[in-house]
Amino acid sequence: MRRTRAVVTWSVLLLLLGVPGVGGAQSLEVICFGSQALNFLPALVASARPVTVSGDGAFSLCLSMAHPELMSATMEVPPFTATLGCGLVEAQTVLSFTWNTGETSTLVATTDVHSMAGMVMVEARGAVTEGLFAGREVVFNWTAATPDSLGCATPGGVTEYAGPSSLAILPRRPGGGLGDAPPASPATSAGGMQRLQRP
């Protein structure tokens, strides 16, 4: 059985250019660059079916003037089950980060998924609910290649999406506003991703 691995190798754009109200890296608590992969079991095929999804990632470069000790991080997407075909959907997701210092951060976010020029563009915005930077707003961007139609049509399907990613944690602002996000719904805090209903 043929298995297709959807991978993108082109460089990630600077996330700070897409964050409203943020003028540069010095305005962020921390900004990181790395890569992420989502794995699917069984593989994604053209028609939707129950699939177990899990993922991980690594940020090999983190920059922070406020926290210079933060230089890298790893990320985990806890396993969850959803009915999926060859395509990602808008969802609520839980991401767990472990910093090079040993400290951790748990993020609950809502993703926005769209395709452009053969790429899947994912932006997740939410709040850190536990650990380092609790209460701060986070923007996570991830880009992956759109699976080819032949891979989706074969029994082996697509087993992985992979590509470059970036993470920005916004600073706390006096009086709230950008950088101080409200706590996310407790219903999403158990881990994984919950598919949102399309209108």
Image (cartoon, rainbow, N blue to C red):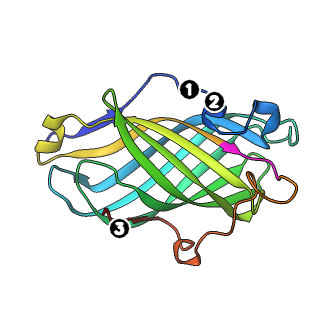
Q: Amino acid at mark 1?
A: Leu
Q: Nearer the viewer, mark 1 or mark 2?
A: 2
Tell me which segment is drawn in magenta: 168-172
- Image coordinates of residue 180 in percent, x first then y, are 75, 58
In the rendered image, which quarter contains the C terminus? bottom left
Distance of mark 1 from mark 2, alpha carbons?
8 Å
Q: Nearer the viewer, residue 179 or 46?
A: 179
Q: Give residue 13's mark.
A: 1
Mark found first going from the N terminus, 3 or 1: 1
Q: Is residue 152 left or right of residue 95?
A: left
Which of the marked residues, 3 or 2, is nearer the chain's N terminus?
2
Residue 19, by quadrant, is: top right
In the displayed structure, would residue 155 be above or below residue 63? below
- Camera-side residue: 11 or 28? 28
Tell us which disc is closer to us: 3 or 1. Answer: 1
Residue at disc 3, secondary structure: strand
Residue 81: give its label. 3
